[in-house]
Image (spheres, rainbow, N blue to C red):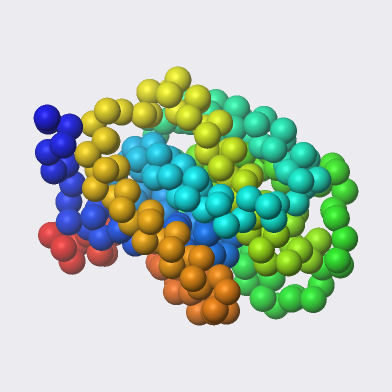
Amino acid sequence: MNLLLLPQHPPLFWLTAILAVTFVGIAKAGFGGGAGIVATPLLALTIPVPEAAALLLPLLIIIDLLSIGPYRRHADIPSLRILLPAATLGIILGALFFRAFSDDERLLQIGIGLLALLFIAYQALRALRPGALPAQRPPAGAGLLLGTLAGFASTLAHAGGPPVAVYLLPQKLPQERFVGTSVLFFTAVNLLKLVPYALLGLLRAGNLATILLLSPLTLVGVALGIYLNRRFDPTWFNRVVYTILLLTAVQLLSGRSPLTFLLQ
């Protein structure tokens, strides 16, 4: 019965959690998951990084499973054959990093903030050079490296989207195939991450009530993502997400949270 009591979290946690889960659902089901990187940095403003990552993982898996249906026949299998084995190695490396530095919360916050800034820089460069990438599959070596980076970043902060995008975008895949490949990749990756998260003691029964309260938002986010995929250009949605991500990264790197101060 105690597991179903309202968890004791500050008001800002619930605001950031609602935004994070909804954005991830929209991003994964609608645009391939890139904007999902905002989730862990947002939650890391109010709770420790390992707890934020662990809390999000079951919700991400729910979103993945809800998103597979519309896109399961559109995945690019040759890309997955290269990316997934490499991602497994990245997950192992990420778990080792977590084990070594899980007690250094400030270092983890800085790492998450830097990952967020790198993602924003990558998106800015893409916008400046929209036609620079040729329509061809990158070499297998590049896929293995990017898959490893994706697994590593996904283990630390559920931020594996950028390396996967770097591998997929040069192929000029149709939007449904790009999204389908991303959804299947991260479904497999997130399920694999359950093993190291459990071994590291990050999955806790005390998070069950919070996960149950947030889980309906996965349905809302996925439904909105599928709707928006065929009706809207993702440009403005991404601009909103990247603005929030930039502000969040600055707060994480500075070690201060103006939003928290306002709500105290």
Tell me what residue is drawn at x 70 percent, y 59 percent: 177
Residue 252: give x, y in percent of width and height.
39, 54
**In the picture, residue 168 is in which quadrant?**
bottom right
Q: Is residue 233 visible?
A: yes
Residue 190: give x, y in percent of width and height.
53, 38
- Direction from residue 221 to residue 76 in the image, left or right: right
Residue 71: give x, y in percent of width and height.
61, 56
- Direction from residue 130 to residue 110 in the image, left or right: left
- Direction from residue 75 to residue 160 in the image, left or right: left
**In the picture, residue 78 is in which quadrant?**
top right
Tell me what residue is drawn at x 18 percent, y 66 percent: 262
- 232 relative to 217, above or below: below
Q: Quadrant of the N terminus?
A: top left
- Direction from residue 208 to residue 64 in the image, left or right: right
Tell me what residue is drawn at x 50 percent, y 47 percent: 64
Q: Quadrant of the C terminus?
A: bottom left
- Which of the pair 13/222 is nearer the observer? 222
- 249 relative to 143, above or below: below
- Which of the pair 165/152 is nearer the observer? 165
Residue 129: give x, y in percent of width and height.
75, 75
- 31 relative to 187, above or below: below
